[in-house]
Amino acid sequence: MLKLTEDLHRRNPEARYADFYELATFNHILSTQHPQHGGYVYFTSARPRHYRNYSAPNEAMWCCVGTGMENHGKYGQFVYTHVGDALFVNLFVASELNWKERGIRLRQQTQFPYSETSRITVTQGKGRFALQVRYPGWVKPGQFSVKVNGQPVSIITGPSSYVTIDRQWKKGDVVDITFPMHNSVRYMPNLSQYIALMHGPIMLAMKTGTEDLAMLIADDSRFGQLASGRKLPIDQAPILINNHIEDIARQLQPVAGKPLHFTLSTKMVNEIRNELMPFFELHDARYMMYWLALSEDNYNAYLDRLARQEQERQALEARTTDRVQPGEQQPESDHFMETDDSFVGNTNDVFYRDARDSHYFSYLMQTGGQTNLALRLKYWGVGEWKSHEFDIYVDDVLVKEVNNTGKYRISEFKYESYPIPAEALNGKQQVRVKFVAKPHKQIGEIYEVRLVKD
């Protein structure tokens, strides 16, 4: 994402790209290495009260170990950029710049995000150029200020823009930048009932416990990169209650002597009252980074519905020996997908895989040694204009000939389970589950594949 953002900024240097780059750098990249033993994170879970685990030298050496090393060597890569004679200050990072083509050297001094100021000094060279200082999107209108050699710069732009200072520069010139940070609420894009609490661009998180941190330091197993401890029930996680969700940000109180640490006074169900801190400081613990936030009027009904859904989900997980999310790279790679000609897409942001006209796709799935299993598939209901006919095989044993043509005619997800003959499972720890389209027909989008105890 940061490489993509750099390319977009190179094509069109807008401050909104640098705003995103800053969010990703300080909240995600900076958080992905353990500060003591140096292990790297593969997955960062946003699930309430879950946790992350870390790599171990010569054992857990995933692709994200190599990429993780590379990430932390790139902090200086986007602090400054230039287009012609315009020099962009994109990030507030203590750094030095050698602009060789112009014979200019700059030094930026800041303790951001633990401070709200930065100073840029011309340490070598002279010449005319436009210094473009980012006015971050998280600073309120009218609160951003810039001074050159003690004199205020007129600012005619607003948040998420660049302030242009076009002048003749010389050694010893000093630019002082002030960017007051404030607390705010950010909504999860696809689940707006969940919010993040921010101070400036910094996501705040709370430690919630250290129980069942299985595989905190990963081993060399196939799925060692997963934090495999129990997923705690979502309905029992802390829930913030306020009739005006935006007001929650104003109920954060700074902790004296601990920059970027806060207490939260808003009403809370399933209460946990630890300090909020920058997510990049939080390690070796379960945490809250996204919070369910509800009004007084609707939280009881929502909580009842959430509890029922969570009970159903937990019961399904207890029956599941393995599952695949078709169309997503990691789950399909983990299950050694094979295909001769299939395709992917998504509906309502859920991915699927499909095939037509005698083509197939298949996954290697774990049985847990069970022989009383069924195959549970997830479909999308609308599709009556397509001929959905296919065969399901388990290790070349025909399990079911399926015909879903015109079956549902409703815009919602549907689930079907197909028992697997015991002779296809006896003595096996894993089996290959294969979907083959009938000649001149289509399988029909498959959104989830599960092996469940029947």
Image (tube, grey):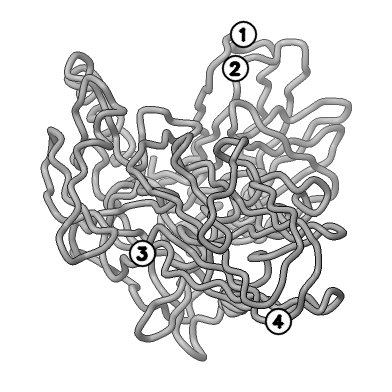
Mark nearer the N terminus (3 vs 4) = 3
Dot 1 corresponds to which residue? Answer: 409
Give the image quarter of residue 77: bottom right
Question: Which residue is located at x 30 percent, y 47 percent?
Answer: 48
Question: Which residue is located at x 25 percent, y 29 percent?
Answer: 247
Mark nearer the N terminus (2 vs 1) = 2
Mark nearer the N terminus (4 vs 2) = 4
Tell me the mark number nearer the camera, choosing from 3 and 2.
Answer: 3
Dot 3 corresponds to which residue? Answer: 114
Question: Which residue is located at x 73 percent, y 79 percent?
Answer: 98
Mark nearer the N terminus (1 vs 4) = 4
* Percent position of residue 138, x then y: 47, 43
Dot 4 corresponds to which residue? Answer: 124
* Percent position of residue 315, x then y: 29, 39
Q: Is residue 313 left or right of residue 103?
A: left
Query: What SS does tag 3 mark?
Result: loop
Kindly identify the amino acid type of the residue bearing the numbered disc 3. Tyr
Cβ atoms at labels 2 and 1 below 8 Å apart: yes
Dot 2 corresponds to which residue? Answer: 381
Tell me the mark number nearer the camera, choosing from 1 and 3.
Answer: 3
Give the image quarter of residue 25: bottom right
